[in-house]
């Protein structure tokens, strides 16, 4: 995968960073806050921003799943009530520590409309209160439940897809690994600028991890420390799915952002999947920074990414042409 590593931000990337600066204006760096403080301040602002973009073209609802490990709230997005569509299970980002499904409301609205799916976004347990592997266990339970019983009020086919962004892509991939030999395993995955290993020696970390391009290696260390605080129950193959046995996974569509310290995680994952024959397609979000999925008004190229993901799902007969 021959993607260049420009050092200078483009105008589009700089505008995206400025927008993030506006959203979190006046707040201390996340590394200077406790997880609870960060959720109380950062999450509230991202939720307000995401909901300000909603167009009202999907029906949004909330429900509770009675799972073996405890109930989980889910948020659903239905672009075509009464019409059967595949179910896409979405796992939000936030470094395993932050965010709630509401912070991805607009992301899920766009996915539902462009991929012609019902979206079910998981409010999975967050670290450090629930360190690795709790989020993966809970998400696997949720996928099993939804595969067997669906969700009241959503008219779905029996096809399931799982998608995630950033740390949510990490959890989504680990969930696929947990379920790959089970009948409830989703038929495909869509993973956007995911973190798949704890390795800060990659070229993308060295090029973009200092902080001038958005997400930094130091902030990732803060997230990792909270996620792996109960490490005795979380082996490398769960926290770092790039190190797992990837054979037997369903087709995967992988997207990465150009100015992102995590970009090489996607390159490495794609290379390993190709080597073992797992169907995979990659998409580079040109001028993208980490988190740009949440800044869709500034990134018209995200519509191209969603179209590419839809075409990928059609080619692999995950959804009807």
Image (cartoon, helix red, strand yellow):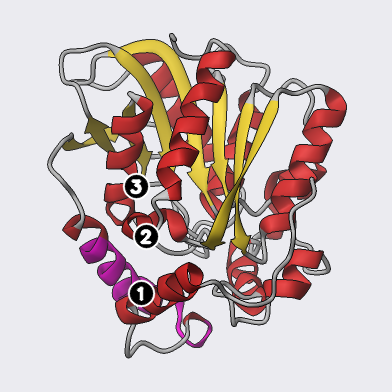
Label 3, label 2: how many angstroms apart (C-alpha)?
Answer: 9 Å
Q: Secondary structure at mark 1?
A: helix
Was residue 313 drawn as part of the magenta stretch in this picture? no
| Range drawn in magenta | 31-49
Q: What secondary structure do most residues of the magenta stretch adopt?
A: helix
Q: Secondary structure under badge 2? A: helix
Q: Position of residue 318 (x, y in %)?
A: 51, 14
Residue 110, image x, y percentages: 31, 40
The residue at which mark 3 appears reads as 107
Spot the residue most to the right: 275
- Provide the residue designation for mark 1: 19
| Residue marked by disc 2 | 295
- Depicted 147 relative to depicted 1: above or below: above
Nearer-N-terminus badge (1/2): 1
Q: Are marks 1 and 2 in contact (CB under 8 Å)?
A: yes
Q: Is residue 228 above or below residue 187?
A: below
């Amino acid at each position: 995968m021959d993607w260049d590593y420009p050092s200078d931000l483009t105008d589009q990337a700089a505008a995206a960073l400025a927008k993030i600066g506006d959203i979190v204006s006046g707040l201390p760096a996340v590394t200077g806050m406790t997880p609870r403080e960060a959720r109380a301040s950062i999450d509230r602002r991202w939720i307000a921003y995401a909901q300000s973009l909603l167009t009202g073209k999907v029906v949004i609802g909330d429900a509770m799943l009675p799972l073996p490990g405890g109930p989980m709230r889910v948020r659903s997005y239905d672009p075509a009530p009464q019409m059967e569509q595949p179910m896409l299970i979405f796992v939000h980002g936030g470094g395993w520590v932050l965010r709630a499904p509401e912070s991805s409301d607009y992301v899920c609205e766009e996915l539902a409309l462009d991929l012609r799916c019902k979206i079910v976004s998981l409010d999975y347990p967050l670290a450090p209160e629930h360190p690795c592997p709790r989020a993966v266990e809970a998400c696997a339970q949720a996928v099993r439940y939804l595969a067997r019983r669906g969700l009241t009020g959503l008219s779905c086919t029996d096809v399931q897809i799982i998608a995630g962004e950033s740390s949510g892509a990490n959890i989504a991939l680990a969930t696929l690994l947990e379920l790959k030999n089970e009948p409830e395993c989703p038929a495909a995955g869509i993973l956007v600028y995911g973190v798949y290993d704890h390795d800060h020696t990659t070229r993308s970390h060295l090029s973009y991890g200092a902080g001038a391009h958005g997400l930094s290696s130091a902030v990732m260390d803060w997230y990792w420390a909270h996620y792996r605080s109960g490490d005795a129950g979380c082996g490398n193959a769960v926290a770092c799915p790039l190190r797992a046995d990837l054979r037997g996974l369903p087709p995967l569509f992988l997207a990465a952002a150009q100015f992102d310290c995590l970009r090489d995680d996607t390159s490495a994952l794609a290379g390993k999947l190709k080597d073992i024959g797992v169907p995979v397609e990659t998409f580079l979000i040109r001028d993208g920074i980490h988190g740009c999925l949440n800044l869709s008004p500034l990134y018209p190229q995200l519509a191209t990414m969603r179209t590419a993901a839809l075409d990928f799902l059609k080619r692999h007969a995950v959804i009807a042409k």
